[in-house]
Amino acid sequence: MTATSLPPDPAPRVRIRVHRLVLYTVLVAVTGLFVGPFGWLVLSGLKTPAELAASPVHWLPGHVQWHNFADAFHLIDFLGYARNSLIIALIYATLVTLSSAWVGFGFARLEAPGKKTLFGILIGSMMLPQMITLLPTYLIFAKLGMVDTYWPWVLWGLAAAPYLVFLFRQFFAGLPRELEEAAIVDGCGYGTIFWRIFLPQSWPVLSASFVIAFTWSWGDYIAPQLLLSTDKSTLAVAVMSTYVTSAGTPVANLQAAASVMYVVPILLIFLIAQRGFVAGMSTTGLK
């Protein structure tokens, strides 16, 4: 006798579909939380001042005001301020990425007394708010005659960043010890090992660190406002302080339109470097 085959149980497939539906629903909701503010910013840039001030809220513009973007672009030296921001961001991001990689390499591969204590102090410094060091930083740069120059960002870049040092330290600690042992046998010093072996291997973390540092500098408002004059100021300062009426009231729709154009370069950089950024953030610390 042959056993009668039973039809497959549909319950597992139903559970899988329900789980996927729940997962997709959660992902869409989370995506909406992140995309929603930017979408509202775009809509605000397409409204009139009266629509922005209306109560109850007008969710969609009655008549799309595309000229707000052109007005925001031409009312100030938009490209000039963007150029200043780009110069500062590139200087800082490049230098802080390389200096943080060097410091992270030292913490990961070199042995010295008190290394763990120094690393703990470095990580602890991430808890210090920027406002605490703002006044001493300004006084130091004023004494050195570096106010209204780009030298502060050069020095900040050379000083490394604790969070980026942590990323590089975790990545370099996961590389096999045989790499540097073979290089030492061939007569290489640690400087050569870093530049010719470890740094080329760390492109995912380099991409992630550069994007993070560029975003920090591009979005910084306090330091450029404090250290730079109007001609050398950045786009972040110009967007927040230039679009005002004669009475000093902010023109919100122009600020929103300018803010959208201000965010676009960051989005483009992330889209270009997203593969390396995601790889760097996901592989850091893995053996």
Image (cartoon, rainbow, N blue to C red):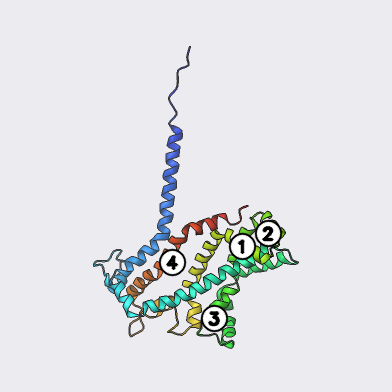
Of discs 4 and 2, which sits in the foreground? 2
**Residue position marked by numbered label 3 in the rendering:** 151
Query: How far is mark 4 from mark 3, CA to CA?
Result: 23 Å
Going by the numbered disc 4, the residue's amino acid type is Ile
Residue situated in front as seen by the camera: 213 or 186: 186
Mark 1 or mark 4, earlier in chain: 1
Mark 2 or mark 1, earlier in chain: 2
Residue situated in front as seen by the camera: 22 or 96: 96
Mark 2: give few (<14), some (14-19) or many (20+) Cα within 10 Å. Answer: some
Element under disc 3: helix
Mark 4: give few (<14), some (14-19) or many (20+) Cα within 10 Å. Answer: some
Is disc 4 in contact with disc 3, using a CB cutoff of under 8 Å? no
Is disc 1 in contact with disc 3, using a CB cutoff of under 8 Å? no
Mark 1 or mark 3, earlier in chain: 3
Residue depicted at 40% across the width and 71% down the height: 262
Where is residue 138, by image quadrant? bottom right
Of discs 3 and 2, which sits in the foreground? 2
Decide if residue 97 is on the left or right side of residue 264.
right
**Residue position marked by numbered label 4 in the rendering:** 266
Query: How far is mark 2 from mark 1, CA to CA?
Result: 10 Å
**Residue position marked by numbered label 1 in the rendering:** 196
**Residue position marked by numbered label 2 in the rendering:** 183
Is disc 2 in contact with disc 1, using a CB cutoff of under 8 Å? yes
Q: Position of residue 226 (x, y in %)?
A: 50, 82
- Work out whether 156 lies above or below 211: below
Residue depicted at 58% across the width and 65% down the height: 164
Query: How far is mark 1 from mark 4, CA to CA?
Result: 30 Å
Checking the image for residue 12, the label placed there is: none
Going by the numbered disc 3, the residue's amino acid type is Trp
Decide if residue 130 is on the left or right side of residue 177.
left
